[in-house]
Amino acid sequence: MTTTADGTDSGATSPATSPATSPSLSPAQAAQMIATLETEMAKVLVGQRELLRRLIICLLCDGHCLLEGLPGLAKTTVVKALAACWHASFARVQFTPDLLPADIIGTRIYEGGIFAAKRGPIFANLVLADEINRAPAKVQSALLEAMQERQVTIGDETFPLPRPFLVLATQNPIEQEGTYPLPEAQTDRFLMKVRVDYPSAAEEREVLDRSLSPQESWVEPVLRLEDLGLLRSALHGVHIDDRLKDYCLALVRRSRDRSAEAGELPRLIQVGASPRAVMSLAQAARAHAMLSGQHFVTPQDVKAVAPDILRHRLILSFEAEAEDLDSDAVIAQLLRQVPVP
């Protein structure tokens, strides 16, 4: 089952985009634009600030995001609102066991005496793959190939996907019946895996009050798609020191280290993070620094994004599972082991 909704014209202008009129943005200006976006999102989103910031980091880094959480935690709401704030097109695909690859990427149909390509819902700026682990492997592969190549082939024609292109996939961590877990090698294509938790008592009360209020609110477009290009350019203005690059490299390589120097980690980690994790960690740390208006990356920025970058890239051993250790606990040990520059 698929539903699509196109945003307004990407060339439209909003008063909130005034900083983007300059040829380039400083990290402080970029942080102000992002703060405007967060303020607009607060109209419909209660709490979940870290979730929103992780999604913005994925947008800035041109990376996809896997959201893991129980139903009813506003995962779909935040994605739809984020697309509406950006003048971006949005598509939602509900993954089910009977879904076919053509239901996502499109197919060829006979119309007017010729075969023509009918594009699927994947041709959108933001694609929400709801409950991705409910579709079989061939459907997951079709989506993940499009994520990597940024293009799809329908028949003998190849079509580029719109830019920006971001897949936000959700999955329920507790249900096993009727699910097809993503292979670890394919989850590596997601920049981040973000765990969505329950709101606090005060936040949940506010959700209740809003649901009982007769007034309904929704977000307004405050940024253009062109502004995303400016923000990504500003990201290159955030300095990352060579010692922090080495720190990112040391964290990832320690996850693969089988020597005695690694302590307990070789016993707990069966397969460590890939080289792609190094690039993702450094880039996400840059974006995290820019969200705070910083001109440079600090070790704390690396530590802040490390769990989201690494938790889906580590395959834990049976010993770790027997000791009831999850990937976050192992990553915490990893961060304690590697010296901070």
Image (cartoon, grey):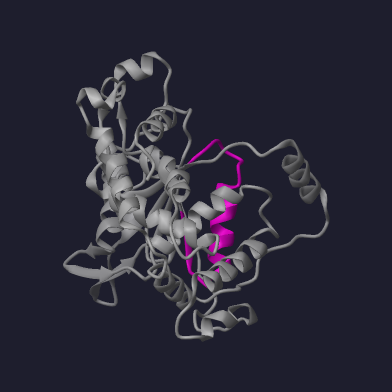
Q: Is 340 above or below relative to 89?
A: above
Farthest residue toward the front? 341
Query: To which quarter of the image does residue 216 belong?
Result: bottom right
Residue 95 in view, yes or no? no
Judging depth in this view, the residue of 149 and 222 nearest the camera is 222
Task: Say which of 235 and 154 sits in front.
Answer: 235
* Residue placed furthest toward the left: 156
> Residue drawn 60% across and 73% down?
221
Compared across the picture, whether 300 is left or right of 334 comes to right
Horizontal side, residue 117 vs residue 48: left or right:
left
Can you give x and y, in whole percent of width and height, for residue 139 in the image?
Answer: 30, 47
Magenta includes 82?
Answer: yes
Answer whether residue 236 is magenta in the image. no
Q: Residue at x 40, y 70 (%)?
A: 237
- How many marks on residues? 0
Establish if 301 lies above or below 336.
below
Quadrant the C terminus occupies: top left
Compared with residue 58, is residue 170 higher up or lower down, i.e. above or below? above
- Residue 294 appears in the rendering: yes
Which stretch did the figure color magenta? 68-92
Left or right, 10 with respect to 118, comes to right
Residue 265 position, x and y percent, is 30, 25
What is the x, y in percent for residue 297?
43, 57
